[in-house]
Amino acid sequence: MRSTRLSRIALLPAAFFFLSPSPASAQKPITIEQFGKRIQKEIKRRKLHVVVLLDLSNAEGRFTERTQPVTAELSDFLSANSGNIKVLRAGFRVAAAQGALSAADPGTLQQLSAFCAQNKCDALLHGTVQDGPSGKTVSISIVDPQTMKALAEISALLRPDAGNPLYWVDPHFSEPPPYAAPGKDGVSMPRCYYQPNPLYSEAARMNHVQGNVTMGVVISREGKIVKIAVLNRLGFGLDRVALETVRTWKCNPALDRNGNPVPVETTVEVGFHLLL
């Protein structure tokens, strides 16, 4: 049910518009929750019942560390707040430059059509994320899965903090960086002896979401997890579940070459895999 892996990484800082909307640059930045409500309003107006949220890409059709967190946060909100509307995530990515879904690879489109037929979906949510000086501009198309033509376009300027990594810091931990790297300069690997299984969120179970959530962590000289930043996200509530689970881990601390405990920064993975 759960898999973990330790390795070295630098921890990140704990730090509706219908068709023809006004330019995003002239919009007031909003939260992902506010943007999600605009999408919900249009979905309900069109009396849609099953929608598939595709991973958002940049304008060149690439999926990056800047676009993936926005997809995850949007899926979290829509799956938890859409009532009788079923929100699904496809188990594959559809790359299409400039947000034109009909321009995607024919084989991928055929796979997507089969997925929609199997799940009786009546709309696709597909779009792009672009970084700008005032925040991230997100454009979402509500697409007819049979014709691959847009039914509506919704865009907004998100606040600069939207799509940032989830993070947590123990308020009692005050030791400043830099921290040691396990496996280098004679520093041993920490050994975590208490790692409870994470629980599946209901939204993730319903959507058969599987995969790994990767987190950068700092483990103190007492063997406590004191900093966590979610680096790779799955959405549907699993990222928060993974973070809260890792907070409870208990470890034997890393030791330097003289046998003294030292704080270290590393990565861990929490795996979510459904037993069929």
Image (cartoon, grey):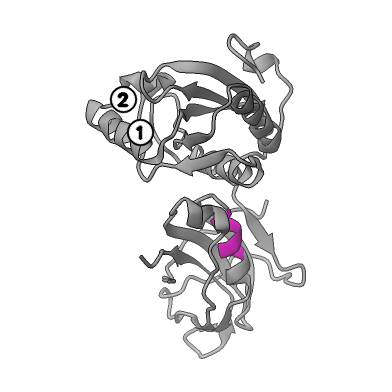
- Please identify the quarter of the rendering in which residue 59 is found: top left
Residue found 45% across the figure and 63% down from its top: 272
What mark, if any, has residue 94 been given in the picture? 1
Residue 49 in view, yes or no: yes
Does 106 sit left or right of 183 as displayed?
A: left
Report the residue at 51% width, 59% height from top: 10
Q: Amino acid at mark 2?
A: Ala
The percent coordinates of residue 1 (x first, y second) are 43, 71
The percent position of residue 191, horizontal first and vertical second, equals: 48, 83
Residue picked out by circle 2: 104
Q: Main secondary structure of the magenta part?
A: helix
Q: Which residues are magenta?
A: 237-243
Q: Label for residue 149?
A: none
Q: Residues within 10 Å of mark 1 (few under 14, many from 20)?
A: many
Q: Is residue 257 above or below residue 109?
A: below
The x, y position of residue 165, in whole percent, is 59, 49
Q: Along the line of sight, which residue is nearer the eye, 77 or 85?
A: 85
